[in-house]
């Protein structure tokens, strides 16, 4: 991760590309960004950035997660920046920066009227009216802080859909019945996931002659599948 302390004072945003599971308790800002890699499943990745009311932040990527506690003024600076964007009306409708429209972000602001904003394009191509939002997205993508430390989830949300990935497939040998997985995202303890890819990196599974794309999404504290 690039350590850029200056980002702390002006960072923060909230996004979520492709719908993800449950709510994150006490979240003030949630920002998600897909990695765009072939065969990846962005909705199974941990959020790129989460700020909670207790000033704890979680910073993720395709798989790994870091967590730390911001100073009170650092957290307030982020909240004020988000509030200013909300007052400007920029967060009232989906936004497109232009450039590569395949690049997608999603910003969710529970405190700002439950705003859930889809953003597409390259922040560097943003028109003047969206420069503030583009700066926020750029800072979130680069966010780092000296207090961040590696964090490991206790549970994952396992999901499956019928589909094929390049290469072979593995048998489903876990105790959790596969029918429950097919019914919707289901909790699974970390010990059962040790030998499986997690986050946006999916696994190919064969069950009863059919092939499935299976993902294990790390759950933040209190988050529902």
Image (tube, grey):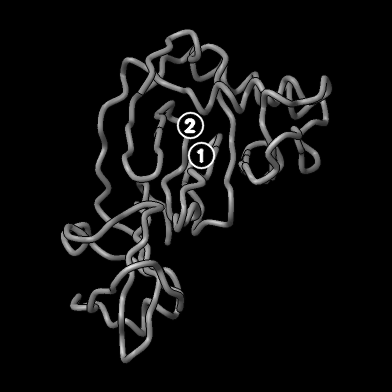
Q: Can you tell which quarter of the image residue 128 is in?
A: top right
Q: Specify whether 152 is left or right of 126.
A: left
- Tell me the number on the disc at residue 144: none
Query: Split into 4 quadrants, where in the image is the N terminus?
Result: top left
Direction front: furthest residue: 167
Which is more N-terminal, label 2 or label 1?
1
Q: Nearer the viewer, residue 215 or 51?
A: 215
Q: Nearer the viewer, residue 42 or 132?
A: 42
Query: Split into 4 quadrants, where in the image is the C terminus?
Result: bottom left
- Label 2: which secondary element: strand
Task: Tell me residue 47's x, y (percent).
Answer: 46, 42
- Tell me the number on the disc at residue 51: 2
Direction bottom: furthest residue: 208
Direction top: furthest residue: 6
Q: Which residue is mark 1?
A: 27
Task: Tell me residue 170's x, y (percent).
Answer: 24, 74
Tell me what residue is drawn at x 48 percent, y 15 percent: 8
Task: Tell me residue 93's x, y (percent).
Answer: 80, 42
In this rendering, does residue 118 appear at all? yes
């Amino acid at each position: 991760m690039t350590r850029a302390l200056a980002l702390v004072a002006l960072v923060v945003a909230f996004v979520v590309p492709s719908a993800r599971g449950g709510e994150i308790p006490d979240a003030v800002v949630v920002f998600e960004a897909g990695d765009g890699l072939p065969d990846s499943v962005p909705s199974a990745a941990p959020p790129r950035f989460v700020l909670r009311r207790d000033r704890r932040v979680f910073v993720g990527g395709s798989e790994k997660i870091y967590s730390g506690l911001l100073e009170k003024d650092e957290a307030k600076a982020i909240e004020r920046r988000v509030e200013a964007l909300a007052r400007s009306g920029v967060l009232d409708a989906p936004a497109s920066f232009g450039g590569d429209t395949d690049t997608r972000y999603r910003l969710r602001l529970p405190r700002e009227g439950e705003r859930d904003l889809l953003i597409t394009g390259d922040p560097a191509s943003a028109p003047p009216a969206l420069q503030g939002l583009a700066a926020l997205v750029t800072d979130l993508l680069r966010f780092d802080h000296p207090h961040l430390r590696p964090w490991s989830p206790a549970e994952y949300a396992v999901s499956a859909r019928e589909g094929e990935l390049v290469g072979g497939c593995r048998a489903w040998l876990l105790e959790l019945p596969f029918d429950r997985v097919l019914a919707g995202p289901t909790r699974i303890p970390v010990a059962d996931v040790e030998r499986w890819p997690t986050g946006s990196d999916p696994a190919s599974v064969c069950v009863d002659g059919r092939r499935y794309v299976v993902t294990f999404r790390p759950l933040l504290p209190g988050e529902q599948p």
